[in-house]
């Protein structure tokens, strides 16, 4: 799905990943669930891009619903997978801290579970090799993505700012559709390790001035990063 020139999304408002398409090639942000592999191939075909044009995949964090097809892409096509060192072991299937009890509603919970299963969520393929990135680093990838540390959801959560498409990709730093309650609009994401830290970390995004705010769960937000952060703070 094309969101804007050079900016694409695969998946849906339950689980999503993104593609940035430039003359230098394609950069992927997150890898959704394993079954999103077919969606990736279909989107690349619609874009007129062979898979060899994918130059790198950046993970916003190491949870299974973001790692998805990453290992397949790395193993079969040699695409490097970038992740913050604090989430490297998590992306390789390492332990995840226990979260506090979550608020949920049965309907959205079942919808999230059913969609995850339909996309192979129970068959996660963890990474075996990663390239580590650090806060402030500008990667030599299409769009010149800049890494912004966003600890809270996980210790190594990051956002990725790509000025070429006026977008900041936030992973689970915030959500615009709560997968457990169905509530829409910018708000704190569930399953967050350190909820207060996650909200405080959002201040680092304001300097981007990005119009597009693109989460791993929920509809793309085109109302600007400042409005999104304010909405999250009010929803806490």
Image: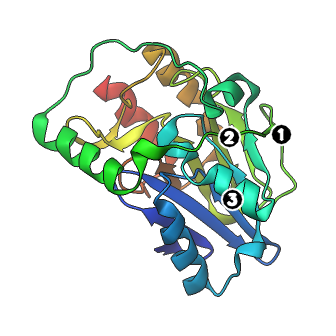
Is 192 left or right of 26, judged from the image as shown?
Answer: left
On the question of residue 1 being in view, the answer is: yes
User: Which of label 1 and label 2 is nearer to you?
Assistant: 2
Residue drawn where x is 83% and y is 39% of the image: 137
Residue drawn where x is 46% and y is 74% of the image: 1
- Expressed as whole percent of the image width and height from the top left, the position of residue 165 reads 64, 64
Residue on which the image places disc 1: 137
Residue drawn where x is 59% and y is 56% of the image: 167
- Can you tell which quarter of the image residue 140 is in? bottom right
What whole-number distance in Å separates the C-alpha atoms at marks 1 and 2? Answer: 22 Å
The front one of 138 and 63 is: 63
The front one of 56 and 215 is: 56
Tag 1 and tag 2, C-beta contact below 8 Å:
no
Badge 3: residue crowd in 10 Å (few <14, some 14–19, many ≥20): some
Is 137 left or right of 200, judged from the image as shown?
Answer: right
Label 1 residue SS: loop
> Where 146 sits versus 94, above or below?
below
On the question of residue 182 being in view, the answer is: no
The numbered disc on residue 73 is 3
Is 180 left or right of 82, judged from the image as shown?
Answer: left
- Can you tell which quarter of the image residue 176 is in? top left
Residue on which the image places disc 2: 127
Badge 2: residue crowd in 10 Å (few <14, some 14–19, many ≥20): many
Is 96 left or right of 162, judged from the image as shown?
Answer: left
Which of the two labelled residues, at mark 2 and mark 3, occupies the earlier sequence position? 3
Label 3 residue SS: helix
- Can you tell which quarter of the image residue 61 is in? top right
Which of the two labelled residues, at mark 1 and mark 2, occupies the earlier sequence position? 2
- Expressed as whole percent of the image width and height from the top left, the position of residue 94 reads 61, 23
């Amino acid at each position: 799905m094309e969101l804007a020139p050079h900016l694409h999304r695969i998946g849906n408002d339950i689980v999503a990943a993104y593609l940035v398409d430039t003359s230098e090639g394609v950069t992927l942000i997150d890898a959704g669930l394993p079954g999103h592999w077919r969606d990736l191939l279909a989107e690349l075909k619609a874009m007129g891009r062979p898979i060899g044009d994918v130059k790198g995949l950046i993970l916003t964090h190491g949870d299974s619903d973001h790692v998805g097809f990453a290992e397949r892409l790395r193993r079969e096509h040699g695409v490097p997978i970038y992740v913050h060192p604090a989430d490297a072991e998590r992306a390789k299937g390492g332990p995840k801290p226990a979260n506090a009890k979550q608020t949920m509603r049965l309907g959205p919970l079942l919808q999230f579970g059913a969609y995850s299963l339909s996309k192979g969520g129970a068959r996660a393929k963890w990474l075996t090799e990663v390239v580590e990135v650090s806060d402030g680093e500008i990667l030599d990838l299409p769009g010149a993505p800049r890494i912004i540390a966003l600890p809270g959801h996980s210790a190594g959560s990051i956002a990725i700012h790509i000025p070429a498409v006026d977008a900041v990709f936030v992973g689970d730093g915030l959500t615009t559709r709560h997968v457990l309650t169905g509530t829409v609009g910018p708000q704190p994401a569930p399953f967050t390790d350190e909820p207060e830290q996650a909200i405080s970390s959002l201040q680092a995004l304001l300097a981007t001035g990005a119009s597009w705010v693109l989460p791993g769960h929920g509809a793309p937000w085109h109302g600007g990063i400042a409005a999104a952060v304010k909405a999250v703070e009010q929803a806490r």
